[in-house]
Amino acid sequence: LMYLGRLLSGIAYGISIAVTSIYIGEISENSVRAMLNTMFPIFSRTPLLISYSLGPQIPYHGFIFLSCLPVILFLLMYLGRLLSGIAYGISIAVTSIYIGEISENSVRAMLNTMFPIFSRTPLLISYSLGPQIPYHGFIFLSCLPVILFLLMY
């Protein structure tokens, strides 16, 4: 009876894989369709694969942790983005102070003005234009101010 339950749930799950991908493709926008069609099945179906393959061999608490691992990794991506944003915000103040301390008087004003502009403009571009332009154009536009700064320096 246990094997019949696994067989029926596997068949239902296999059907839902195709139906969910079609449904996500219908309701999502073009800019996020590929990401949703790949990330959603990975993070929603990996725990089932873990439970079928490793469930009988590992203890109960380890099984719960392994089943929650994809969700934990997904949340860690958000935590990493939050921490990098905080570090970037702190670097805004620290970099200007450091440049002011080590630069000569003749170029101090230029460096303290131009460095924050050319290093923070890609962040502004990414939040304002990122969703509206293609991926490779987005990378080029984000790198353009930094390249211009290096060429002028």
Image: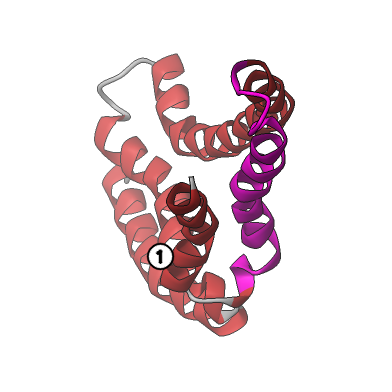
Identify whether 61 is placed above or below 120: above
Identify whether 135 is placed above or below 2: below
Estimate the x, y position of residue 58 in percent, counting from the top left.
Answer: 30, 19
Residue ranking furthest to the bottom = 26
Q: Which residue is drawn at 52% across and 32% down?
A: 72
* Residue 35 visible somewhere in the drawing: no
Estimate the x, y position of residue 109 in percent, counting from the top left.
Answer: 72, 35
Magenta segment, principal secondary structure?
A: helix
Magenta-colored stretch includes residue 116:
yes
Q: Which residue is drawn at 60% across and 17% down?
A: 102
Magenta-colored stretch includes residue 22:
no
Looking at the picture, tell me which residue is in the foreground, 107 or 123: 107
Estimate the x, y position of residue 75 in percent, counting from the top left.
Answer: 58, 36
Which element type, helix, strand or loop, lies under badge 1?
helix
* Residue 45 visible somewhere in the drawing: yes
Q: What residue type is labelled 1?
A: Ala
Is 36 left, or right, of 10 in this rendering? right
Q: Which residue is drawn at 38% across and 45% down?
A: 46
Label 1 CA crowd tier, 10 Å (few <14, some 14–19, many 20+): few
Task: Report which residue position mark 1 lands on.
Answer: 12
Q: Which residue is drawn at 65% across and 54% down?
A: 121
Magenta region: which residues?
102-131
